Image: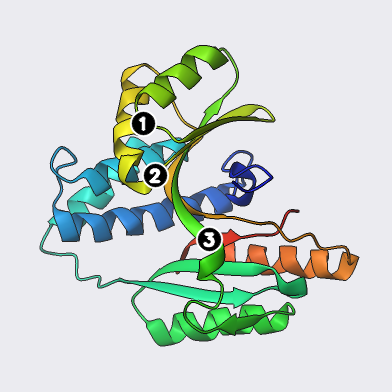
Amino acid sequence: MSGHSKWHNIQNKKGKTDAQRAKIFTKMAREIIVIVKEGGPNPDSNSRLADAIAKAKAANVPNDNIERAIKKAAGAEDSSDYESLVYEGYGPGGVAVVVDCLSDNRNRTAANLRHYFDKFGGNLGATNSVMWQFRQCGLLVVDKEEVDEDELMMCALENGADDFNAEGDAFEIVTAPERFSEVRVALEGAGYTFLTAEVTRIADNDVSLTDEKDRFKMQLLLDALEDDDDVQKVAHNWAE
């Protein structure tokens, strides 16, 4: 397990500006559209869609936005054609970075990401240049407020979770990717709600940046990546 909070490497959805929230909503709608086109509009028979809906709700995406994205993807009028792309590279000070994208123009996306890495002291790498430093995990984060730690931990572990951690003002539940849906459904059935609910990449080891300029540039790189419309998810091993 990474030594610091898994949630720390996932952008906190709380306290975002209206513009930032709108961008998050748009990205999640794009993800839902792709999943519906691949597996259908019924979350009962499309587990990936059920997971995406849970992820969107954890990010406070309104139900109307979620339903609109599903209807758009299921309708004949939607002509969007997104593909999943994964880019790997190094940030300042050797920080490993993996960027998951959904794009309708891979040339634009690649050019934009190369520009961000070059501008802020990093560089894009070849396939598998840094991926070996990460592993896929399901992550569920529950606010500590009014939640009994022992009951939550027991419920999570009994239903297949791999790990349970108390981190700051939240509890983190880590699962194998293939057990994520099962654990999520069980916790929802027990009445728990989530601050984060997704399958993500977790770094096995952290990198600390001692140089102030490197830390500054690394944060600028992450901000630029998160602000790009094509970028869905950014994983890194910066200990921050």
* In this rendering, position of residue 169 left or right of residue 215: left
Question: Identity of the amino acid at label 1?
Answer: Gly
Callout 2 amino acid: Ala
Residue 228 visible, this orientation = no
Residue wearing tag 3 = 134
Mark earlier in primary sequence (2, 1): 1
Q: CA–CA distance between discs 2 and 3?
A: 13 Å
The disc, 1 or 3, on the residue closer to the chain's N-terminal end is 3
Q: How is the image coloured?
A: rainbow
Under tag 2, what secondary structure? loop
Give the Cα distance between marks 2 and 1.
Answer: 8 Å
Label disc, if present, on residue 160 of the rendered structure: 1
Secondary structure at numbered mark 3: strand
User: Which disc number belongs to residue 176?
Assistant: 2
Q: Secondary structure at mark 1?
A: loop
Verify CB contact (< 8 Å) between mark 2 and mark 1.
Answer: yes
User: Nearest the camera: 41 or 68?
Assistant: 41
- Residue type indicated by callout 3: Phe
